[in-house]
Image: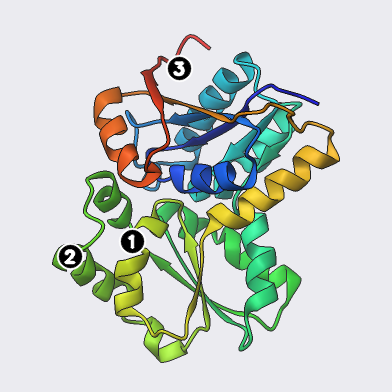
Amino acid sequence: MDTRPIGVFDSGIGGLTVVTSLLNELPREKIYYVGDTARVPYGNKSPTSIRRYSDEIVKWLIHHNCKVIIIACNTVSSVALEYLKQKYNVPIIGVIDPVVKYALKITKNKVIGVIGTTATIKSDAYGKKLRLANEKITIINIPCPLFVPLVEEGWTSGAVPKSIAKVYLKGLEKVNPDTIILGCTHYPLLKGVIEQVLSNDIQMIDSGLVTSIETKSTLAKHNLESNKSQQELQIFVTDSSELFKESASSFLGDIRIKVKRIELSSY
């Protein structure tokens, strides 16, 4: 048994949707979460910058003895996962592969929509993997760059996000997908708004749940499971800790959290 923490990171608050699923799926684990709030969003950054930012965070998590690292960010998973896997000798899990497997399993008409940040959509990370698995799959990629700032500012319901969602998603009606991949860990917080815009028959895939199941399997495979009697969550951010704590508590509920500001440059 291994009581070292699981490291999770994202550009901001969105990765906590993955953390919430991890807490439900892995009740004995300690989790360290890093939100790079000083540099959010990642979706409009260059691949070079994204690799540098994620490299700094992974170094910090390894320095703090994390046994597994979860990239709770589709943008990083799409442009930096393989780079990080090659560089570090620790299991690193991205959010894309588990979601692709699940999407292929549940789609019936083989038409899948992918919504994500500009960087994720430009990389075509989901499309490449879906087509590799099944060349008959039709993929519709739609960038939704304003969704992350909306979530970071707490605009997850109401007329403003709904009107923006209508503009982004209007093209989906013509191609009739039966499955939508929420290709950013911020987007589940806008699920209610997206449901108001799309048909009720469309299935939406939240990467949090499928990634937590993949993590549980990885821990068992490498004999890294913890036998602690109580789980623990510690949150680290690169900008204001108070602002983050206020936002995080709105969907972590009654879970007690500690938020601390850190500097990454020294690692």
How packed mark 1 is, by other alpha carbons closer than 10 Å (few <14, some 14-19, many 20 or more), is many
Q: Which residue is mark 1?
A: 190
The structure residue drawn at horizontal position 45% and vertical position 42%, both measured from the top left corner, is: 16
Residue 49's quadrant in the figure? top left
How packed mark 3 is, by other alpha carbons closer than 10 Å (few <14, some 14-19, many 20 or more), is some
Tell me if residue 240 can be seen: no
Q: Classify mark 1: helix, strand or loop.
A: helix
Q: How is the image coloured?
A: rainbow
Amino acid found under the numbered disc labelled 2: Gly
Q: Nearer the viewer, mark 2 or mark 3?
A: 2
Q: Nearer the viewer, mark 1 or mark 3?
A: 1
The structure residue drawn at horizontal position 51% and vertical position 61%, both measured from the top left corner, is: 206
Q: Furthest-left residue in view?
A: 159
Tell me if residue 25 can be seen: yes
The Cα atoms of the two marked residues, 1 and 3, are separated by 30 Å
Residue 169's quadrant in the figure? bottom left
Q: Which residue is mark 3?
A: 264
Q: Which residue is mark 2?
A: 158
Earlier sequence position, callout 1 versus callout 3: 1
Earlier sequence position, callout 2 versus callout 1: 2
In the image shown, does 100 or 253 lie closer to the viewer?
Answer: 253
Could you tell me residue 10's position as x and y percent?
46, 38
> Is residue 165 found left or right of 108 in the rendered image?
left
The structure residue drawn at horizontal position 28% and vertical position 39%, both measured from the top left corner, is: 247
Q: Classify mark 2: helix, strand or loop.
A: loop
Q: Is residue 53 above or below residue 155?
A: above
Could you tell me residue 142's position as x and y percent?
41, 69
Amino acid found under the numbered disc labelled 3: Leu
How packed mark 2 is, by other alpha carbons closer than 10 Å (few <14, some 14-19, many 20 or more), is few
